[in-house]
Amino acid sequence: MFHSSPSSFRLSVVAFGCICASCSLTPEADYPPIVDQISTLAAFQSELPKSAEISPSEGWWIYIGGAELDALVRTLIENNFSLTEAREDITQSIERYHINRGQRLPAVNLSTGNARTNFLQPSGEFDWIDSFDLDLTATLESDVFGRLRSAERSSYLSIEATKLTYRAREQQEIARLASNWIAASTLQRRLDLARDTAASFQSTYELTDQRYRGGSTGVSANDVQIARQNYESSLIDIPDLEAQYKTQLFEIDTQVASLPGQTQKSFLGSIDLKTLSAPNLDVPSAILSSRPDIAAADFRYRAALEDIGSAKASLYPALNLSASLSFSGESASDALDWDARIARLSQNLTQPLFQGGRLKAQVRLEQSEARELATVFARTALEALTDIEAALTDLRSLSEQRRRQAEAVETARTSNTLAQSRYRQGSTSILSVLETQRSLNNAALNLILIEQAFLNAHVELALSQGGHWFPAPKETGGAHDGSS
């Protein structure tokens, strides 16, 4: 610590600042080579995206579940515990930024105190003297090497990364909700199919029994037994499907933070598959910039580069400036006497000499973490490309399977109708009718399962592309317009 006149103090600070002001210890971004390949392929914008606001993404889910699923998504965004935790992560990252930013500003402290001292007077008697003090102190780290600036920039980039991580988690939760909703709707359709199939077998059994009791020569007791056996077998799966259906709705209740049974009260599960088709994207990777997890990985890498700059700056001298104004007197009023002031300016230059290798190890640690995060960024981008291509491949394949299975269902339905008609006329056996009924049931069940996979592939594509590949929906049953 040393003291100087104000002019020499200012001169020394300016001189030292001029020497170091041009120092930039934060390294340039160095992405893995595959990032350049992806950038060329996808026209991917490597610049930092704008700040991500917390708001629902485009309403792609409306094309799957309409207003019913949209209402569940709104409840999910508001009440889901995972998303609530993620919003608190954003709040915490903002407060960390304010903490780092506050370190760059002057710290001003006001302290007051009083003391009573007992001393021996010349007369030989002891007496008490009161003293009152008031001190106003301001300190500032000049940050000529940018340690605090780098820490502030790092914390700001972390805020943006946390916001984008929230967006990614929001999309994941919405996609999981959509898949759960599709599963519940599928179970509902399977349950309806099982009941319709049982009703069909019951009708065949009753017709066979009626013909047998009426003395028809084309029907035997064995035919009645076979028809009854098929009818009873068709009832076996219904209780299990009912249990699966309720359990699936409980899963939705948990996700939207509702008590078990709430979703079942209003669940319709209506899906209009005509609004869905396999999209034709020649360059699906061209919209990678909409993936929030990729942008978040980029932000984290750039924040790590700032941490390297901050760690390097700790190796260099730190210049601390302070100013204080003190008052002292024998009474409280004397402590505010301007003539009793004591003003002080000081500057302190500290150069680390020996820290046991701690500071250099910190630099190496930050450098390693930055390299790791660069790899995470590249891996995330590459996995996104793979996710998109896989989802598109599944969609195109399932679209063709769905078309062919729908044709198979129509063929099976026609065969069943003809077989039942011929059976009523007595020109075919009961086995032929039962066989066409089983074929129709299997074909219809396969179509339901293929359509479930088809819908889930749409969800996967929406998730893999950041939730932005569907056009913004227009007014659909009172749902929002899909804009964020």
Image (cartoon, grey):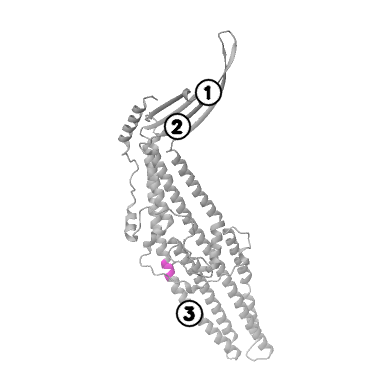
Q: Verify CB contact (< 8 Å) between mark 1 and mark 3.
A: no
Q: Quadrant of residue 52?
A: bottom left
Please identify the dominant SS of the magenta region: helix
Q: Are marks 1 and 2 in contact (CB under 8 Å)?
A: no
Q: Earlier in the sequence, mark 1 or mark 3?
A: 1
Q: Which mark is in front, 1 or 2?
A: 1
Within 10 Å of disc 2 (Cα), the crowding (few <14, some 14-19, many 20+) is some
Q: CA distance from mark 1 to mark 2?
A: 22 Å
- Labels in figure, total: 3
Q: CA distance from mark 1 to mark 3?
A: 101 Å
Say what amino acid the circle numbered 3 marks: Glu
Disc 2 to disc 3: CB gap under 8 Å: no
Q: Which mark is residue 334?
A: 1
Position of 402 relative to 56 (above/below): below
Magenta region: 392-396
Marking on residue 165? none
Q: Secondary structure at mark 2?
A: strand
Q: Secondary structure at mark 3?
A: helix
As for residue 186 lying within the magenta part, the answer is no
State the residue at coordinates (60%, 69%): 241
How many residues crowd around disc 1 within 10 Å: few (fewer than 14), some, or many (20 or more)? some
Farthest residue in the right direction? 213
- Image x and y of residue 30, in percent: 33, 48
Residue 460 coordinates in the image, percent (x, y)? 46, 63
Q: Which residue is mark 2?
A: 138
Which one is nearer the viewer's eye here, 213 or 268? 268
Kindly identify which numbered label has been placed on residue 407.
Answer: 3
Percent across and percent down for residue 258 are 61, 59
